[in-house]
Image: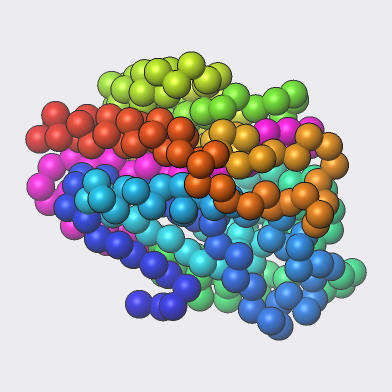
């Protein structure tokens, strides 16, 4: 197993993908970038800590430690946009969510380098995900839960303030409706805002692995990070971002997410 790829195997019919929590950038790549802070700005900050309780639920977790600015393992490897006509970042992003350039002029990765990065990082991450799904599928249907978070306000990507819970199943294509409804109901208990298939309908991971007719049910959860850390109220800078992880602030969200994951496991077990 590569040192940047972490797999915790559990026995429950639940695999949690953590594609954007990494901040590792090879020195040779970072030297070509405009700023180490910008290169890590759009990480799903602290999401791996937020969900670490899932180990006690016997969930399987698959995480890459490599920054999404090196390669985004939740993008279509062909380079096709997941949201045609809308602003989004690519397989090897060249700008931040806010449109800031990630690379010094002329230092962006070319097609050959993008292919190399895919072989080094993208392919092994997805091979690990597939292996875990196949291992658990032997005993019956399995849920893939892709865990994400983002700042509550990113004007270039969406208008206004993002709902707290953003559930995506690509308009019902990637999992059974009963699973989506169970996750929605678990989120609703919190009293916080939620949406199903809003701005975030599920990335490449959800769309690629979600084959409900074959017993693979994939769903994405995009959290507005104000639910567990202090979200900057004004311009984002190295002085205020990323906000530190504070266990007491995060604990209520962890309780909500435990309820969500419990619903995922209960759904899968009900299909066995």
Q: Return the x and y of residue 73 as percentages of the image width and height.
A: 52, 58
Q: Is residue 54 left or right of residue 160?
A: left
The range drawn in magenta is 128-156
The residue lying at 68 percent from left, 70 percent from top is 111
> Does the image show residue 228?
yes
Q: Quadrant of the N terminus?
A: bottom left
Q: Can the viewer see residue 76?
A: no
Residue 169 quadrant: top left
145 drawn magenta: yes
User: Against 110, is 43 above or below?
Assistant: above
Q: Is residue 129 magenta?
A: yes
Left or right: residue 65 versus residue 258 is: right
Q: Residue at x 69, y 60 (%)?
A: 40
User: In this view of the protein, which residue sits in the foreground, 47 or 130?
Assistant: 47
Q: Quadrant of the C terminus?
A: top left
Q: Residue furthest right?
A: 105
Lateral position of residue 221 relative to residue 92, left or right: left
Q: Position of residue 184 (x, y in %)?
A: 40, 21
The residue sitting at the bottom extreme is 28
* Image quadrant where residue 21 sits: bottom right
Residue drawn where x is 56% and y is 33% of the image: 227
Relative vertical location of residue 47 with respect to residue 218 in this rendering, above or below: below
Residue 35: where, in percent of width, then height? 81, 67
Say left or right for 247 vs 98: left
Q: Quadrant of residue 228?
A: top right
- Is 172 situated above or below 52? above
What residue sits 25% from the left and 60% below the top?
9
Q: Nearer the viewer, residue 171 or 66?
A: 66
Residue 51 on image: x %, y % = 41, 47
Question: Of residues 15 and 191, which is closer to you in this image?
Answer: 191
């Amino acid at each position: 197993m590569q040192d940047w790829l972490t797999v915790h195997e559990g026995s429950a019919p639940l695999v949690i993908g953590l594609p954007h929590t990494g901040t590792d950038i090879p020195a040779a790549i970072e030297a070509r970038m405009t700023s180490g802070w910008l290169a890590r700005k759009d990480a799903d900050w602290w999401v791996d800590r937020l969900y670490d309780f899932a180990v006690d639920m016997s969930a399987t977790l698959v995480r890459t430690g490599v920054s999404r600015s090196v390669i985004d393992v939740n993008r279509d490897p062909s380079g096709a946009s997941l949201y045609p006509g809308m602003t989004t970042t690519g397989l090897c992003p060249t700008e931040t969510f806010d449109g800031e350039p990630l690379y010094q002029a002329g230092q962006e990765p070319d097609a050959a380098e993008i292919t190399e990065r895919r072989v080094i990082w993208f392919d092994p991450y997805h091979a690990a995900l597939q292996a875990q799904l196949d291992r658990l599928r032997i005993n019956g249907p399995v849920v893939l839960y892709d865990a994400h978070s983002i700042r509550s306000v990113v004007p270039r990507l969406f208008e206004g303030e993002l709902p707290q819970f953003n559930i995506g199943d690509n308009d019902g294509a990637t999992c059974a409706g009963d699973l989506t409804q169970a996750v929605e109901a678990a989120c609703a208990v919190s009293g916080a805002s939620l949406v199903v298939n809003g701005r975030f309908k599920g990335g490449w991971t959800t769309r690629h692995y979600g084959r409900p007719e074959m017993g693979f049910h994939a769903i994405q959860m995009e959290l507005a990070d104000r639910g567990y850390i202090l979200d900057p109220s004004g311009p984002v800078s190295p002085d205020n971002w990323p906000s530190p992880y504070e266990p007491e602030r995060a604990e209520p969200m962890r309780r909500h997410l435990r309820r969500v994951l419990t619903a995922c496991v209960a759904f899968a077990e009900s299909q066995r």
